[in-house]
Image (cartoon, grey):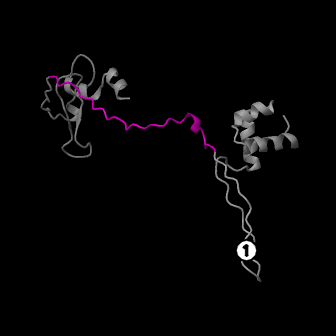
Amino acid sequence: MNWTDERVELLRKLWSEGLSASQIAAQLGGVSRNAVIGKVHRLKLSGRGRATASAPRAKKASAGPAKTATRPTRTITASIGATALQVQFDAEPVARQVLRPVQDVVVPISRRLELTQLTERTCKWPNGDPLAEDFNFCGNDVGESGPYCGYHSRLAYQPAAERRRAR
């Protein structure tokens, strides 16, 4: 598809009227939305939906009364971007607090094991800063599956239903 002078002028006209690139592509025919956007950028056409600046005033004459001539200006008001799909919210958002039921929460006393003392049956939950000298692992007995004891498993693994509700 070649950009003829007539098609470029029609593009300029439709762009200044505020049509979207898709609408312009449909009216021109044989051209994609991306081709229209590319041509608009190459032509350095101004953005749409902005108020036009007032016309420059005529210079004052050096002799006689000071009169200024102004041209009538036209203000164009149009939406910027995809504001047609923008939803207006009048109500303030409602803060929801999710409370988990308290279920026999028992914080285990850590056995404070070092890395070399861990086995398949000990909890590998880290306690403290790994670079500190007093760093250790929980070390309590693990359940049938996973690397953590029951308490640390509940901390580490959140049920899928709760993750969906949080979104």
Judge whether residue 159 is colored magenta: no
Comparing 148 with 116, the one in front is 148
Hey, which residue is sitting farthest bottom in the picture?
63
Q: Amino acid at mark 1?
A: Lys
Comparing 14 with 3, the one in front is 14
Question: Residue 123, relative to residue 75: is it above or below?
Answer: above
Prevalent SS, magenta region? loop
| Quarter of the image that includes the N terminus | top right
- The residue located at (75%, 74%) in the rendering is 59
- Whether residue 4 is visible to the viewer of this picture, yes or no, is no
**Rendering coords of residue 32 (x, y %):** 75, 32
Judge whether residue 95 is colored magenta: yes
Comparing 45 with 146, the one in front is 45
- The residue located at (24%, 35%) in the rendering is 126
Question: Residue 76, relative to residue 125: is it above or below?
Answer: below
Residue 53 in which image quadrant: bottom right
- Whether residue 59 is visible to the viewer of this picture, yes or no, is yes
**Rendering coords of residue 43 (x, y %):** 77, 48
Q: Which residues are magenta?
A: 78-103
| Quarter of the image that includes the C terminus | top left
For mark 1, give the secondary structure. loop
Residue underneath mark 1:
67
